[in-house]
Structure formats: structure tokens, C-alpha cells
Image: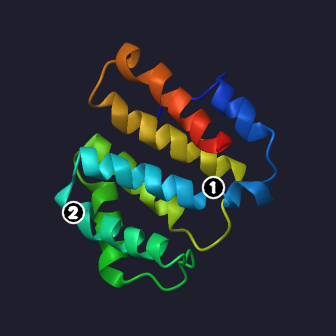
């Protein structure tokens, strides 16, 4: 996969964080990937989005016991023959991992989302605005 964030302000910002701080962005990342799923819905990920929305509303970010249908949907989407679906599924894998998020997770998450956007738009149309969006997301 292409590194969409290489030499960007986003990577500079992420590199100022320590790994403990990276975990603090899990909620925002879940909201961001759910927003993509709302705009470009994949039927297979509807239950994943709904489950994560419930977790957010309950302020429960413990993912040690994820319903099997949710993990199965993420896995299936990850291996389907559709690049944007693969990338969104990969992003969902990151935000539902049991261990705390790291800086590398933040970078990989951003790359997966940007790769998904690249399936819908030309680089000129999406890259700068989406990088700015992600920087703003981490600044809030």
C-alpha cells in the first residue's frame, strides 16, 4: 500500500506523541471510520458500525469480548474483492484491537482511510483536505 502520510504534517504530529497518548484517540478514530461507513456504506460492515456506535455511546472501549458476527464481518470485509472495503475493514481491525493503540496504529489507520478515499476520488481531490481533517481530528 502507498504511504499517503509520508512526510506530512500528520506524521509529524503523530511522532510528537508517545504510545500512551495514541490510545487517547481511539474514540475519535472510531467516529472517523464510522463516518466513512455512513457516507460510503458497505452492507457487510453495517453491524460493525452499529456495534461501535453502541460502544461509544456506552463509553466502553474494552474490546476483549467482541461479538463473533462483528469480528467475522471485519474479517470478511478485509478479504473481499474491493479495495475500499478491505481498507475500511483494516481500519476497523485497528480500532477494535484489544491492546492499546500506538503511534504506528494511528499512522496505519490514516493510511487505510486515505487508501479507501483514493478509490472514490483522485489524489488531487481528496489528499490535502483529508490530511487536514486528520490533523484537526488529532488536535482537538
Residue 133 in the image: x percent, y percent?
51, 33
State the image quarter where residue 83 is shown.
top left
Q: Percent x, y for residue 108?
A: 56, 45
Residue under the point 31% across and 73% down: 72
Can residue 136 be seen by looking at this rendering? yes
Q: Measuring 66% from the left and 60% from the top, which residue is drawn there?
A: 101
Instruction: From the viewer's side, name the closer residue of 13 and 94.
Output: 13
Left/right of residue 46 with respect to residue 108 in the rendered view: left
The percent position of residue 52, horizontal first and vertical second, equals 41, 69
User: Which residue corresponds to mark 1?
Assistant: 25
Looking at this view, is 88 or 2 the one in front? Answer: 88
> Is residue 86 positioned above or below 118 on the image?
below
Label 2 Cα neighbours within 10 Å, binned few <14 / some 14-19 / many ≥20: some
Which residue occupies 34% across, 74% down? 70
**Which residue is identified by label 2?**
44
Q: Nearer the viewer, residue 92 or 33?
A: 33
Whether residue 124 sits left or right of residue 40 in the image: it is: right
Amino acid at each position: 500500500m502507498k504511504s499517503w502520510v509520508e512526510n506530512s504534517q500528520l506524521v509529524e504530529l503523530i511522532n510528537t506523541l508517545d504510545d500512551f497518548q495514541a490510545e487517547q484517540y481511539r474514540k475519535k478514530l472510531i467516529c472517523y471510520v464510522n463516518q466513512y461507513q455512513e457516507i460510503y456504506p458497505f452492507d457487510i460492515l453495517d453491524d460493525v458500525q452499529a456495534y461501535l456506535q453502541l460502544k461509544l455511546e456506552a463509553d466502553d472501549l474494552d474490546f476483549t469480548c467482541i461479538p463473533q458476527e462483528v469480528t467475522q464481518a471485519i474479517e470478511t470485509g478485509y478479504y473481499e474483492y474491493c479495495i475500499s472495503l478491505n481498507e475500511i475493514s483494516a481500519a476497523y481491525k485497528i480500532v477494535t484491537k484489544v491492546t492499546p493503540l500506538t503511534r504506528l496504529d494511528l499512522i496505519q489507520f490514516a493510511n487505510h482511510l486515505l487508501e479507501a478515499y483514493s478509490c472514490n476520488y483522485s489524489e488531487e481531490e481528496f489528499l490535502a483536505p483529508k490530511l487536514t481533517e486528520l490533523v484537526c481530528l488529532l488536535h482537538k
